[in-house]
Image: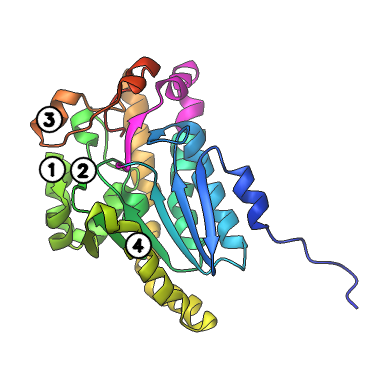
Amino acid sequence: MSLTSYVPTPKFEEYKELFKEHFEMERRDGIIVLRMHTLGGDVQWNFELHRAIWQAFRTVGSDPENEVMILTTTGDTWIANMDDSSFSKEEEDRPYYSYEHMYFDGRQMLISLIHDVEIPTIGVIPGPGAHTELALMCDLTICSDNTILIDPHLDLGLVPGDGIHSAFIELMGVKRATYAMWMCEPISAQKALEYGLVNEVVPRAKLMDRAQEIAKRLVSKKRTTRRMSVQVMRRPWKQRIVDDLDGGFAMEMHAYLCDKPQHRDRIGEETLKDKGAQFDMTEADRKKGVRGNISA
C-alpha cells in the first residue's frame, strides 16, 4: 500500500453546482456540454465569466470521466451583450483590472482551452456575437446559418490582440485575417465556412443535434487513441499561443493604458446595422440596462 493517497479528482455533480452561475452543464456517456449563460439567458460579457471560463476548462480537463467537450451558449447569440455593472469596476483601478482580469484571465481562457482540456472539443456558435475565438479554437467548430463573426477592436480604438487575432491568422491566413481586422469585416456563416473558420454551417434548430452526433462519433473511438490524437491535431494551436497570444494581449493592454480612454468595449447599434448585423434586445433587457451590442 502506498504511503500517501491521491488528491480526489473533481466530481461532475460538484463542479456543475460550483459553476452554475456561468454555465449550464450536462454530461451523458462521457460527452460534457458547457452552455455559457447570464441569469439563464443570453451571455452578457463580464469579469466574473471571464475568470470562470478558464477555471471551468481546467476543472473539466481534470475529470477523467469527461471524454468530449461541447462548448456553446444559451439563446440565439454567442456573446452579444455586456454587463456594464461588472466592467465599471475597471475605472476604480485601471492598471489592476487591466492586468488581473483583461491580461491574466483573458490569456488563461485560451491557454486552458488548448493545454488543459486534453479531450476533443467542439465549439457550437448559435448566432452572432464577439469573442468567438473561444469556439474557433476548439478542435471542431460548427455554427448556425445566421452566425456573423466579427473582430470589432479597431473600430473601438483598440488593438486586436486578445485572442481573436490568433484564431483569424491561424485559420484564414495573413491576408484575409489582416483585412478582417483592419476593416472590422462582418463574416457571414457561409463566408466563415469558405474561409475555413468553421467546419459546418447547420440550421439553428438542428445545431445541437449535429454537435451531439459529432461528439458520439468521437467518443466511440478508443480512449487512448482519441486522447493522443488530440495532442497531434492541437500542436498548431499550441504553437500559435507561443507565437503571438501573450504579445497580442500585452500590446492591446499597453495601448489601452497609454490612451487612457473611457471604457470602449462596445459597438453602437447603428454601427452594427451599418455592417449588416442585427442584435435585438427584449424590453426586459432594456429595463435591466443591458445594451444590445457586441463586447470587445
Which span is picked out in magenta? 76-99
The mark closer to the camera, 1 or 4, is: 4
First in residue order: circle 1 vs circle 4? 1
Q: Circles 1 and 2: CB distance less than 8 Å?
A: yes
C-alpha distance separating marks 3 and 1:
13 Å
The residue that disc 1 covers is: 185
Whether residue 94 appears in magenta in the rendering, the answer is: yes
Q: Which kind of residue does numbered mark 3 sit on?
A: Lys
First in residue order: circle 3 vs circle 4? 4
Q: Which kind of residue does numbered mark 1 sit on?
A: Glu
**Tag shown at residue 209:** 4
Would you say residue 65 is visible in this rendering? yes
Q: Which residue is pictured at 57% across the width and 55% down the height? A: 58
Residue 14 placed where, x, y %?
67, 50
Q: Secondary structure at mark 1?
A: loop
The residue that disc 2 covers is: 150
First in residue order: circle 3 vs circle 1? 1
C-alpha distance separating marks 3 and 2:
13 Å
Q: Secondary structure at mark 2?
A: loop
Query: Is the N terminus in the top left, top right, bottom left or bottom right quadrant?
Result: bottom right
Residue 32, compared with residue 294, is above or below; it is below
